[in-house]
Amino acid sequence: MSADDRALVAQAQGGERAALDELLRRHYDRIFAICRRIAGNEADAADAAQEALMAIVRGLPKFDNRAAFSTWSYRVATNACLDELRRRKRRPTPSLVDEHDGWAEKHTDDIEPAFDEQIAVRDEVQAALNGLSEEFRAPVVLRDCAGLDYAEIAETLGIPPGTVRSRIARGRTKLAEIMRAGNQAPTGERQNKQS
Amino acid sequence: MNPLPPNADELVSAYVDGHAAPDEIVVVESSPELMERVEAFRSVTDLLGTPVEAPPEQKEAHIAAALGAFDAMFSADVSADVSADVSAESIEEPTAPLTAVTPVIDDQEQAKTPAAVTSLSQARARRRPRRFNIGVIAAAVAVVLFAVVAAFGFGGGGGDDLATTSADTAADTREAAADDSGDFAIEDSTGDDAMDDAVDDDSDSALSGLASAAPQPTAGADEVARADIAEDDSGMDEEAMEEDAMEVEEAAPADTPPLDAGGAAPFLLADRGFGNQELLLEELEFLTAEELDQLALKVDDGLFPGCQTEVAELAQFDSPTLIGETFIDDDLVQVHRLLDDSGEITFVITDVDCMVLP
């Protein structure tokens, strides 16, 4: 995969559009996942993913293959997300209903239970992640969503590997606590719903 | 039961990731409590690893926009190469990129014009000619002196011819140099004559002097001509103004795709950041008013990203002020352009928290 990426990068740097197309398609899902997890909502994630792709295109001529393309592109995506988060700080936070444009209200009755379950799990994970501060969220996402190792995360975030290790640990501890607490309440709610 | 080590969670986390040292592995695996935490952490990591799928139409749109930017980037490079090649071959041949663009865009069309990146290299390309101009003007002065010496010092038929030609050339050159408040507008018809003479009539000794003293009319010289027109509109005739518009279009290719498709501002001077604010302001000074207008229009359509609604100095403007984003010392900043009634331009730079940089 990595060797293929190298070949595609070289072709894209030479101006081959199809090679860039393939590269972007290959990594888009992971890039979006990183953005979704770090940004915390669909709209910001979409903005960040778009900006990440643009940054990849702009940075491609200077990309020197010292890192794997995947690592580099995830780094670019992370930076785009962190920029988006900083921009978001100065915007009013939309409510959940606003954010989904009333989608949940409109579709509550007709969604399949399995899909409902998936959404619930996804929302639960995302809600837990949103409970983490940026400094813990980013390393955890880069580790667990992007699969980067500590050194790569350290390089991406500009912090020492030892700090990466401790932040991931603290982030996971906090996540486990949030999800444990969250699992108790929804269980009761589900039982009430069924009865 | 052994007490848990103080960094138990860190050990467990590193263990889950396969980053634990051998002695740490022993500690974790020998403790049932730590192994319980390992399971808890694993379930967290499994959940986080759950695939997150983007809406397919969004994926396609994002990739298409990125490919569009890629196309624009490469077509801009190719245009630059073609322009340089053509200029090197013959400065009389019109270059394809200049003839391909529409010189005048009305307001509505301008608002729809996709975003373009105005890069530092383009801004710098416009600066270089000033230094070149000084060289050309110095050469012209040298020719004048040479002509005077030739006319009064040497006399004779051949000398008369030489002096006449030299004086003509010098006059042409002076005229061109005097045009546009001292800028040497080679693209102006008089300037064209001067340069054409310099190229075409190498047999003339005075012109040979000019040709050898001044840089050869290669791609750089062609660039000088177009860049000077773009920089200084004052006193230009209509034809020159049209060429000016072409130059602006060349700097921001008409087919450049939208960089703000996702709602983000177009990146200004995106090829690198700046060490400090002064360096950024210095580069901004080399953007023409038209380029700034176009950059501001990129973020129209009711979208006022960034600080316009929050910073009092910016909120009073109905039209978009944001012209782009860049980095100062690795910190993201937004650059706003304010235009007062007299047409004076002021730049306002804000950080990501909408604080105006002093």
Image: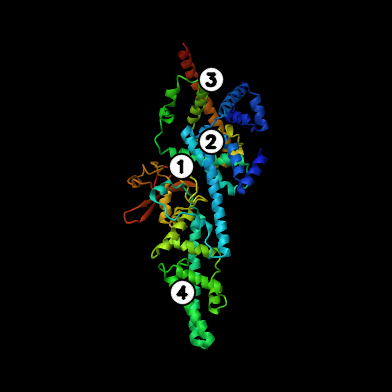
Identify the chain of the residue marked 3, using the numbered disc in the image. A
- Residue at horizontal 54 percent and vertical 35 percent from the top: A32
- Helix, strand or loop under label 4: helix
- The residue identified by callout 1 is B264
Pick the quarter of the image with the N terminus of chain B. Answer: top right
Q: Residues within 10 Å of mark 2 (few under 14, many from 20)?
A: many
Q: Residues within 10 Å of mark 3 (few under 14, many from 20)?
A: few
- Respond whether the residues carrying marks 2 and 1 are from the same subunit: yes
Q: Return the x and y of residue A93 as percentages of the image width and height.
A: 41, 33
Colour setup of the view? rainbow
- Helix, strand or loop under label 1: loop
CA gap, disc 1 and disc 3: 36 Å
| Nearer to us in this view, B56 or B331 | B56
Compared across the picture, whether B155 is left or right of B335 comes to: right
- The residue identified by callout 3 is A114
Residue A66 seen from this side: no
Mark identifier at residue B59? 2
Q: Comparing marks 4 and 1, which lies closer to the viewer?
A: 4
CA gap, disc 2 and disc 1: 17 Å
- Respond whether the residues carrying marks 3 and 4 are from the same subunit: no
- The residue identified by callout 4 is B172
- Residue at horizontal 46 percent and vertical 34 percent from the top: A43
Identify the chain of the residue marked 1, using the numbered disc in the image. B
Compared across the picture, whether A7 is left or right of A125 comes to: right
- Respond whether the residues carrying marks 3 and 2 are from the same subunit: no
The amino acid type found where label 3 is placed reads Ala
Q: Residues within 10 Å of mark 4 (few under 14, many from 20)?
A: many
The amino acid type found where label 1 is placed reads Ala
- Helix, strand or loop under label 3: helix
| Nearer to us in this view, B37 or B337 | B337
